[in-house]
Amino acid sequence: MVTGTAHPPGGAHPHRVVVVGGGFGGLQAATHLARAPVELTVVDRRNFHLFQPLSYQLATGALSPGEVCYPLRAIFKRRPNVRVLLAEVEGFDLDARELRLKPGAGDSGPLSISYDTLIVAGGSRYSYFGHDEWQDLAPEVKSLESALAVRGRILSAFEAAEMEPDEPRQAGWLTFVVVGAGPTGVEMAGQIAELARDTLRRDFRAIDPREGRVLLVEMADRVLTSFPPSLSRRAARSLEQLGVTPLLERTVVAIDRDAVTIEAPDGGSERIPARTVIWAAGVTASRLAARLGELAGAELDRAGRVAVEPDLTLPGHPEVLALGDMVRVRGADGTPVVLPGLAPVAMQQGRYAARVVRARLRGRSIGAFRYRDKGNLATIGRARAVADLHAIRLSGFLAWAAWLVVHLWYLVGYQNRLLVFIRWSISFFTRGRGARLIGAAPAGR
Ligand SMILES: Cc1cc2nc3c(=O)[nH]c(=O)nc-3n(C[C@H](O)[C@H](O)[C@H](O)COP(=O)(O)OP(=O)(O)OC[C@H]3O[C@@H](n4cnc5c(N)ncnc54)[C@H](O)[C@@H]3O)c2cc1C
């Protein structure tokens, strides 16, 4: 049984910090606390850190799981004060300062871990806007499993089209719809277009993959709404050059096994035969946010994010910090500050949380969290990207080079950086994708 009872209440033990989540925020908090005089426990329901910004490359066969995931245990192998637990957190007892873990196979009873300081970074999940039944029809690429399932569906669609004698049905297999034109949707659509246009060009006999259609459906009137309009326009142009059709100001109103129905602002609707739909629309906070909110009486916003104080602590619980995609931070005047759901936000908050703990151990306090926004990048395809670096706005090759450097820099693990660099270099010159594998799981809809 995993408990914190190795440290009797009141007994002399190092300060016990538990970090929930080994994603961007949790990992930064943990690595910046690993050398502090604390006993640190990192709990995650996966035994690896997933570099989510590249999960769409998993979904299109450009990269393999081992290149974008890194085992959490390996990160802390030289830190005897850090233990890593593969477990799902079910709930919290804020009064007893314990967190409850979901029992694994063969466990006899509820498991709990005691903490002196708790840092929760449970991230977010995709929201289907009240249509959870679409989840299976239009998978997303947030987790390793779903990214690989999407890879299977995309590649299987080309295989099914090759075997389909009926032309309209073949067209359905060769139509790919991506819902949501934020960075992930744009990247996903661009990659499918490149896969069809370049990588698979000569692979089939009955079909020409280049005739495949990639539709990018977006409710707003432009793609990449978090970027300045001029960069949105350039991104849309790049997408069109790649063969992607942006369908702007369109709302998905129905998805079934064979088609997607979209609605225009005038109320007119269109049913598009398409066997592969990928969801890249809004996100909602991890369920852990709601649990913390309920227990502490903290408000949740419409995206399910729990409101935390300017120092990331849970209202009334200075020993609990929450951060990343699952929180909304209050400004000094009490009003919520809107921060984007991006890795740099979570990483800066993770480092800040570690500083808070280290300062407290020295009997000090530090000022409120402040996000330093260094800019925004999105890639569209080979040598095509946009970069809003505030002072400079870039598009095309330069933006793409900046995107490559930033992503390689932030990937976890030197080996992964080297492997991804080699993979990208090979793909750049050959336009190939080495991980075009269809797993055993049923891939068609
Ligand atoms: C497809 C995709 C592409 C993206 N691209 C970009 C990009 O290009 N640039 C960018 O800046 N941001 C990007 N983001 C956003 C970025 O990944 C998130 O903002 C960032 O991951 C948030 O970090 P986090 O620590 O809050 O959560 P995460 O990194 O999601 O980490 C949460 C961790 O908590 C664990 N966890 C959750 N619940 C439990 C539980 N109950 N018990 C145990 N463990 C739990 C999860 O397994 C996970 O490891 C992208 C996101 C997605 C999904």
Image (cartoon, rainbow, N blue to C red):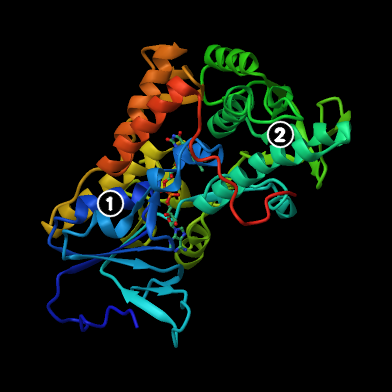
Label 1: state its secondary structure: helix
In the displayed structure, would residue 173 be above or below residue 245?
below
Q: Is residue 390 visible?
A: yes
In the image, 121: left or right of 242? left
Name the kind of residue labelled 1 in the image: Ala
Q: Which mark is residue 166?
A: none
- Looking at the picture, how far across and down is residue 244, in whole percent? 66, 22
- Looking at the picture, how far across and down is residue 417, in whole percent? 31, 37
Viewer-side label of 2, 1: 2
- Residue that numbered label 2 is attached to: 177
In the displayed structure, would residue 41 be above or below residue 346?
below
Circles 2 and 1, Cβ within 8 Å, touching? The answer is no
Q: For the point 35% across and 31% down, which residue is it?
A: 422
- Residue that numbered label 1 is attached to: 29
Of 91 and 261, which appears nearest the observer?
Answer: 261
Report crowding for label 1: few under 14, some 14 to 19, many 20 or more residues within 10 A (C-alpha): many
Task: Give the Cα separation between the discs numbered 2 and 1.
Answer: 37 Å
Name the kind of residue labelled 2 in the image: Val
Q: For the point 59% across and 52% down, which residue is it?
A: 439
